[in-house]
Image (cartoon, rainbow, N blue to C red):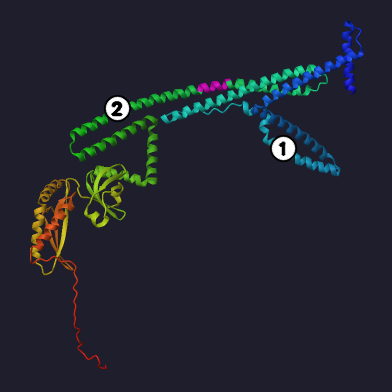
Amino acid sequence: MKKTLLLFSLFASLLYGEVKDKNATLSESELIKIAVKKEKQRTSKISEYLKTLQQLEDEISKEKVWTKSYASYLTSLDVRNSLQKIKERIKFLQKKRKKTLSQQDELSALISKEKILASQIEKLKEKDSAPFSKIITPPIIEDKPSITNPFDIFTGISLIKTLDADYNDYIKRKDKLTELIALLEKEKNIYKEIAILDIEKEYVKDSEIKIKQLERFETALETMAVTAEVYQKRLEIIEININKDIEVQVIKLAKIGVVVLVVFVIFFLLKLFVKKYITDNERFYMANKIITFINVTLIILIIFFNYIENASYLVTILGFASAGIAIAMKDWFMSILGWLVIVIGGSIHVGDRIRVDMDGMKYVGDVMDISLLRMTILEDITLTSILNNRRAGRIIFVPNNYVFTNMIANYTHSSLKTVWDGVAITISFDSNHKKAMHLAKEVVKKYSKGYTDITRKQLNKLRNQYSLKNTNVEPRIFSFIQPNGISIDSWYLTNAYATLTLRSVISVEIVDAFNAEDDITIAYPTQKLHLQDERKEPPFDTKEVV
C-alpha cells in the first residue's frame, strides 16, 4: 500500500511539474486521477506484451529439437552447480571433528545425493560440454567407395542419395534454427519495450535469460552456416569422384557388352553352320552342346579378366573355389567330372538306350539330354518295367556322378543298335527235345535274320575300337534240365528299342510250332489228385495184441 502511494505521489509530482506551467489551477485530486490513469495504461500495455510473449513461447516450444536440447544443456549446468555446492558442503562437514546428530544425518544424505547427481552428470556429459553440440555436428561422411565393377555402381548411387539426404536434413535443422532465432529476436524487442515500462524491474532477469539464450542460438547458427558450407563442398567433391567412377564403369560395361555380343553372334553363326552341314542328329546335338559350353566359358573368362586386375587373384580365387566345391559341394563337383567323362569318353550319347540301377530300382529308357549336372532319361515300356516296375513313361533324372558309383548299361553304344534277347519254353521230359530245339531255331532264324545281318556289320566296325573275341551273331538254342521238364532257351538279336515286339512274335510262333507236334508237350507246374471209393484192409489183424 505504501509502495502504491509512493508511486502515486511520484506520478503526481511529475504531472504537477508538467502541468504547472500550463495550468496552475489543477487541484491535487485531479493530479492523482491522472497518475492512476497512467498506471492503468502502463499495466495494460505490459499485459499485452506478456500475452504476445506467451504466443511467441508457444511457437518456440514447437521447435522441440532445439528447445529440448537447450533445456537438457541448462539441466546439466544446474546439476553440475548443485553437485559443486553439495561437494563443498560435504567437505565442510567432514572437516568438523565434532558433529551433531543432525549434521551426521545431513552428511549421509548429501553423500547419497552426490552419487545420484554424479550418475546424472555422466549421462549428460555430452550435453554439458556445449549446447547443441550433437545437433550442429554434421553427419559423418564415409570414405568414397572404390567402384571397380557394375555392382559397385548401385553402391555409389546409394551413397550419393544418402549423403544428399543427410545434407538436406542438416539444412532443414539450420532453417528451423533461423526461424527460432527470429522468434527470439521478437521476444528480445518486446522485453526492451517492457523494460521502458517496467519501473519495478520485475522482468529484467527474464530479459537477461532470453538475451543469453538468443546469443547461444546465434552462435550455433553461425557455426552451422560455416559447417554447412564446408560440408557442401566436401559432398560436391565426393559426388564428382563417384560420378566419374560410375561413368568409367558404364563405358567399360558397354565395351564388354559389345565384345560379348560379337562373341555371341559368332557362335550363333557357327551353330547355323553346324546345323546346315551336320545331318546326323546325334552329332549335331553334341556339337551344339560343345559350342554352347565354349561360348559360355569364353564369356565368363572375358568378364573375369576385365574385372580382376591381378591375374594372381584369379588363380587364388579359383584355387579356393575348387577346394570349397570339392569339400562343400562334392556331389556337384563329381557330377561335373562325370559330365566330362561322358562327353569326352563318349560312353553315353543323347538318344542311347541305357539302364540305370539307382536306389534299388532299375530304369530303362532313352537319353534325352546330358547337362552339366545330370542326364535326363525317358522311361520306355521294356521287360524290366513289366517284371519289376509295373509302370513306365516317367522322366528320370540321373546325376552324372553315377557313372563312378552305380551300374549304367548302354544298350546302343557306338554303332550297335541291337541286343540279345531270349525266350524260354519248358517241355515235358518225355517230349522230343531235339525236334523242339530244331523248331525253335527255325522260328528265331526266320524273324531275327535282318537284325543278325545288321549286327554282323556293326561288329565289324567295332573291331577298330575294341578287341572282340566272339562275334557269332547267329541265333543260339540251349536246353536245360528244370524240375518240371526241359527248358528250351532261344536267344536271338533284336532291335534295342523294340525288344518286346519281336519277343512277343517269336514266343507265340514257338508255342504254335510245339503244339502242332504230337511228340512235344509244353510242360508247366501241375498236380495229380488220386481219389479211391473203397477202403483197403490193412495187411495185419487190427485186433491182434502186440
Give the amino acid type for the residue marked by disc 1 in the picture.
Ala
Residue 517: image quadrant is bottom left
Q: Earlier in the sequence, mark 1 or mark 2?
A: 1
Give the numbered dot on residue 36. Answer: none
Locate the C terminus by quadrant.
bottom left
Locate the N terminus by quadrant.
top right
Question: Residue at left 79%, top 19%?
Answer: 44
Give the amino acid type for the residue marked by disc 2 in the picture.
Val
Does any portion of residue 218 appear in the rendered image?
A: no
Q: Nearer the viewer, residue 188 or 118?
A: 188
Q: Secondary structure at mark 2?
A: helix
Residue 69: image quadrant is top right
Magenta stretch in the rendered image: 229-237
Residue 364 position within the rendered picture, expressed as x and y whole percent measured from the top left: 24, 51
Residue of label 2: 262
Q: Secondary structure at mark 1?
A: helix
Vertically, is 441 above or below 119? below
Vertically, is 335 above or below 241? below
Q: Nearer the viewer, residue 66 or 390?
A: 390
Q: Rate crowding at label 2 as few (under 14), some (14 to 19) or many (20 or more) other CA atoms within 10 Å.
A: few
Give yes or no for residue 391 being in the magenta stretch.
no
Q: Main secondary structure of the magenta part?
A: helix
Residue 97 position within the rendered picture, expressed as x and y whole percent measured from the top left: 85, 42
Question: Residue at left 75%, top 32%?
Answer: 81
Give yes or no for residue 235 being in the magenta stretch.
yes
In the image, 489: left or right of 133? left
Task: Please identify the residue farthest to the top as the structure is shown.
Answer: 22
Question: Residue at left 70%, top 22%?
Answer: 214
Does any portion of residue 318 appear in the rendered image?
A: yes
Residue of label 1: 118
Question: Residue at left 13%, top 45%?
Answer: 461
Task: Please identify the residue farthest to the bottom as the structure is shown.
Answer: 545
